[in-house]
């Protein structure tokens, strides 16, 4: 279970043209001190939606 204060679930399919802007908007819409969890559920898009999302949130 996450200890996030806010969880956002974002279903996607063929959103490669929009996903970066959507994620940017989500990131800018909340204060930086808020524990935010973004869950992206991609329905096996044939475009690069999943790759773009992975690149936006690199795992460290």
Image (spheres, rainbow, N blue to C red):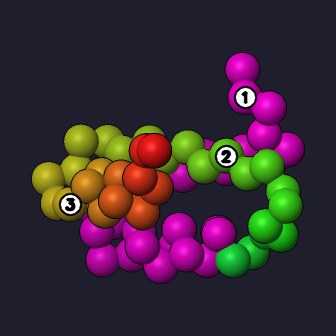
Q: What label does residue 37 carry, if any?
A: 2
Residue 12 in view, yes or no: no
Q: Is residue 14 magenta?
A: yes
Q: What label does residue 2 carry, if any?
A: 1
Q: What label does residue 48 carry, if any?
A: 3
| Distance between the alpha carbons at the discs numbered 2 and 3 | 22 Å
Q: Pick whichever, 37 or 15, lies toward us.
A: 37
The structure residue drawn at horizontal position 78% and vertical position 67%, both measured from the top left corner, is: 32
- Disc nearest the viewer among 2 and 3: 2
Give the magenta part as a residue range.
1-27
Q: Quadrant of the N terminus?
A: top right
- Image coordinates of residue 14 in percent, x first then y, are 27, 61
| Distance between the alpha carbons at the discs numbered 2 and 1 | 8 Å
- Image coordinates of residue 15 in percent, x first then y, are 33, 66
Q: Pick whichever, 20 or 47, lies toward us.
A: 20
Q: Are marks 2 and 1 in contact (CB under 8 Å)?
A: yes
In the picture, measured across the screen, residue 8 lies left or right of residue 59, that is: right
- Image coordinates of residue 16 in percent, x first then y, are 28, 68
| Distance between the alpha carbons at the discs numbered 1 and 3 | 27 Å
Direction left: furthest residue = 46
Placement of 29 over or under 35, stated as above or below = below
Q: What label does residue 41 carry, if any?
A: none
Q: In terms of sequence position, does the residue under pointer 2 or pointer 3 come before the other? A: 2
């Amino acid at each position: 279970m996450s200890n996030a204060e806010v969880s956002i679930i974002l279903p996607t399919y063929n959103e490669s043209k929009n996903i970066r802007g959507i994620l940017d908007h989500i990131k800018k819409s909340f204060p930086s001190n808020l524990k935010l969890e973004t869950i992206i559920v991609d329905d096996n898009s044939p475009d690069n939606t999943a790759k773009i999302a992975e690149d936006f949130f690199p795992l460290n």
